Amino acid sequence: MATLNIQPGPVAQVTLSRPEVRNAFNDEVIAELTQAFTELGHNKEVRAIVLAASGPAFCAGADLNWMRRMADYTYAENLADAAQLAEMLRVIYTCPKPTVARIQGDVYAGGMGLVAACDMAVSVDTANYCLSEVKLGLYPATISPYVIRAMGARAAHRYFLTAERFDAVEALRIGFVHAVVSAEQLDAKVNEMTQALLSASPNAVQRCKALLHDVAGQDIDAALIAQTVEGIATIRASAEGKEGVQSFLQKRKPAWLS
């Protein structure tokens, strides 16, 4: 039985479809998400990807049955298992297409990593968030690179260490999500973001996403400056770069909107 529902199109949607377990993930879900974002990321028809979920919760982290199996794993088996989770997060984070998390319910533990790996996040005002790992004698190691980037180190110091639950307003305040709306407004807000993405140059969006990864947190030194200089020169000389500038100067729509 498939754990995901995938709707293709210019704005593709990947929906977690295990509402009976609050969309908790296991090895099967991890494999399917990795495959879905890999394939959609290389599909030329896809311009943006929405990660959604069915049921009352967005994602409750690791599936309990999976956790029971992991309790008996050897160190080597735990390494292999964690590597698959890390690869899934890497694939989502580095997906060539911009990604938007559509958060219709609670997000816990590993689910925080899914949200953080997406470029943008829109949350309902009733959603709660929690990095609960320390209460289980664990810590959020695999998801930490993405969650710390999303909420900032200062907020991470609090919520990693206390495992406090926080609401959508706090998630917005610390920058973990970009918008908080009512359930009735959720799809409209997600659509607003994806339409903005569709109006931009596909090549520029892809290059811009790579730029964000390359520049964030780096020292502003000669190497980084040289990299950004080379980047703008390259995209200015590209077909879409030239078309975008010419269409602006000529006061017409660019070819990708025609």
Image: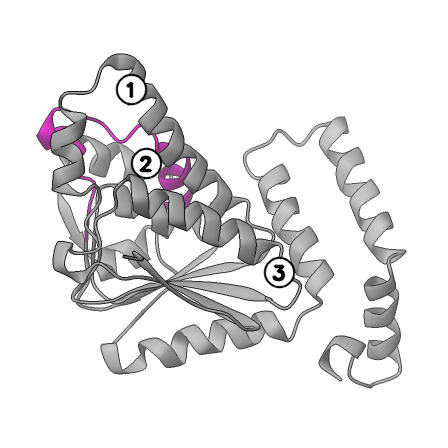
Quadrant of the rendering where the N terminus is positioned? bottom left
As for residue 148 lying within the magenta part, the answer is yes
Where 122 falls versus 59 (above or below)? Answer: below
What span is colored magenta in the figure? Answer: 129-151
**Is residue 230 toward the left or the right of residue 56 in the image?**
right
Q: Read off the residue under disc 1.
A: 77
**Is residue 98 toward the left or the right of residue 1 in the image?**
right
Quadrant of the rendering where the C terminus is positioned? bottom right
Towards the viewer: 97 or 28: 28
Q: Crowding near pointer 2: few (<14 within 10 Å), some, many (20+)? A: few
Q: Residue at left 35%, top 57%?
A: 177
- The numbered mark, 3 or 2, whose residue comes first in the sequence reads 3
**Is residue 122 toward the left or the right of residue 182 in the image?**
right
Q: Is mark 1 on a helix, strand or loop?
A: helix
Q: Residue at left 80%, top 78%?
A: 255
Q: Residue at left 50%, top 70%?
A: 8
Q: Read off the residue under disc 2.
A: 154
Q: Residue at left 49%, top 63%?
A: 49
- Disc 1 versus disc 2: nearer the observer: 1
Where 210 falls versus 139 (above or below)? Answer: below
Q: Read off the residue under disc 3.
A: 43
| Residue that extends furthest to the front in the rendered view of this protein | 1
